[in-house]
Amino acid sequence: MAGEAKTDFSSFMCVILMLTGCLVTIMISNIVIISANPENIQITSIIPQGMDPALDKPVEDAHGNVLKSPWYLEVYRDRLIIHPSEETVQVHDLADKNNSFEKFLNRVEAKIRVNTSCCSSVKTAQPWRAN
């Protein structure tokens, strides 16, 4: 009877250890770079044109990497902060008819209408609007 063939992978262990070391080094360097400058995070798009709400004008980029500023609200007990303009709206100001929050909603609604103009038969629910 012939003996079983034994395979020895010990010669590949050094290669596996080197690859693991390289991957760990790359991960640590990325973590250090991100933790050193957390404000370096950007929201981008591969679409070569877009609307930047911070500038309130259309932006075109030949490289197809349009920087986009997100629109969002920070809600606190006594105020709202509208981003990217960082405008503060106090709770008692929400009772006014033409406050900054209403203007913000009008801008968002206008952008939604522009972006969904091809689908005009679709109606969206708007619970924040009083008739």
Image (cartoon, rainbow, N blue to C red):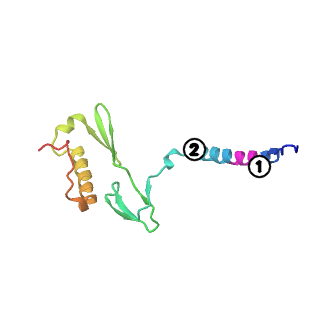
Q: Which x, y percent locates residue 43?
A: 44, 52
Secondary structure found at label 1 = helix
- The extreme bottom residue here reads 62
The residue that disc 2 covers is 36
In the displayed structure, does residue 115 sit left or right of residue 20?
left
Q: Amino acid at mark 2?
A: Ala
Magenta run includes residue 9: no
Residue range in magenta is 16-22
Question: Which labelled disc corresponds to residue 45?
Answer: none
Magenta run includes residue 20: yes
Query: What main secondary structure does the magenta stretch of the protein show?
Result: helix
- Where is 66 relative to 9, above or below? below
Question: Which residue is drawn at the image coordinates 67% and 47% (left, top)?
Answer: 23
Question: Which labelled disc corresponds to residue 15?
Answer: 1
Secondary structure found at label 2 = helix
The residues tagged by marks 2 and 1 sit, at their Cα atoms, a distance apart of: 32 Å
Q: Which x, y percent locates residue 16?
A: 74, 46
Q: Are marks 2 and 1 in contact (CB under 8 Å)?
A: no
- Along the viewing direction, whichever of 46 and 79 lies nearer the viewer: 46
Q: The N terminus appears in which quarter of the rendering? A: top right
Question: Which residue is drawn at the image coordinates 31% and 58% (left, top)?
Answer: 56
In the displayed structure, does residue 38 sit left or right of residue 23?
left
- Along the viewing direction, whichever of 1 and 115 lies nearer the viewer: 1
- Where is 10 relative to 49, above or below? above
- The extreme top residue here reads 77
Question: Which residue is drawn at the image coordinates 61% and 44% (left, top)?
Answer: 32
